[in-house]
Amino acid sequence: MTAIASDRSDPIAAAVARDAVVRIAAAWRDPEPAAHELAVAAVEAGWALEATGLALHHAVSQETVRRTGAGHAVANATLLPLTVGAIRRRRPALIAALDALIGEPLERAAERLRERAGAAVPELADSAVRADVAEAVLRRHAQLRRIPPPPDAAELDALLAAAATGGRAA
């Protein structure tokens, strides 16, 4: 998703990223996801991110891990439905095209991953922790500008508050 929505995207990175999204969404619809499909998707997604750079989702996830001690998988699974929504607000046509490719809203596919992981970051219920994470995220200006406009403190606080319970941002 980042590699598609980023200002640094190019046609090849976007095509590879789209294929990764399709593979991941299809694999996780199955109660027993095909490991091979997930592995191919992971390689594709990694390559596309390397080509375009990290952005909002990774900045928020990485700082959540650093500031709360949450595991990487938990932070990523918890935040993905929320950051998809944030990116949809910035690039609605691109995310709608992904919805069409996978046959459902991208947020729903991300929610399915979060639900399977049972992920939440309860430490984010503390407003001081959220403020610390948001401040650290806002210092990562280069990454945040890749999918303009960059979030402000209020948007980050709402996103992080929703992550405390694994819920949705307002």
Image (cartoon, helix red, strand yellow):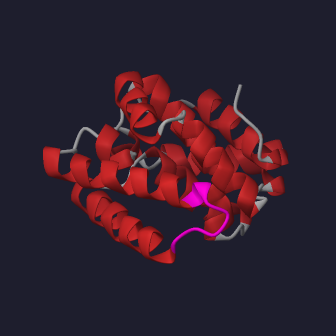
Q: Is residue 146 found left or right of 150 in the rendered image?
A: left
Say if 91 sits above or below 58 in the image: above
The span picked out in magenta is 28-34
From this viewpoint, is residue 64 visible?
no
Q: Residue at x 74, y 53 (%)?
A: 115
Q: Residue at x 77, y 47 (%)?
A: 166
Residue 103 vs residue 167, the one in the foreground: 103
The prevailing secondary structure element of the residues shown in magenta is loop
Q: Is residue 46 found left or right of 32 in the rendered image?
A: left
Residue 127 vs residue 16, the one in the foreground: 16
Q: Is residue 61 magenta?
A: no
Q: Quadrant of the C terminus?
A: top right
Choose top left, top right, bottom left or bottom right for residue 85: top right
Q: Position of residue 52 (x, y in %)?
A: 25, 53
Q: Position of residue 155 (x, y in %)?
A: 61, 29
Q: Position of residue 13 (x, y in %)?
A: 21, 52
Q: Position of residue 75 (x, y in %)?
A: 65, 59
Q: Is residue 147 found left or right of 169 in the rendered image?
A: left
From this viewpoint, is residue 137 visible?
yes
Say if 76 sits above or below 111 in the image: below
Say if 20 sits above or below 9 in the image: below
Number of numbered labels in the structure image:
0
Q: Residue at x 77, y 40 (%)?
A: 167
Residue 39 vs residue 89, the one in the foreground: 39
Q: Quadrant of the N terminus?
A: top left
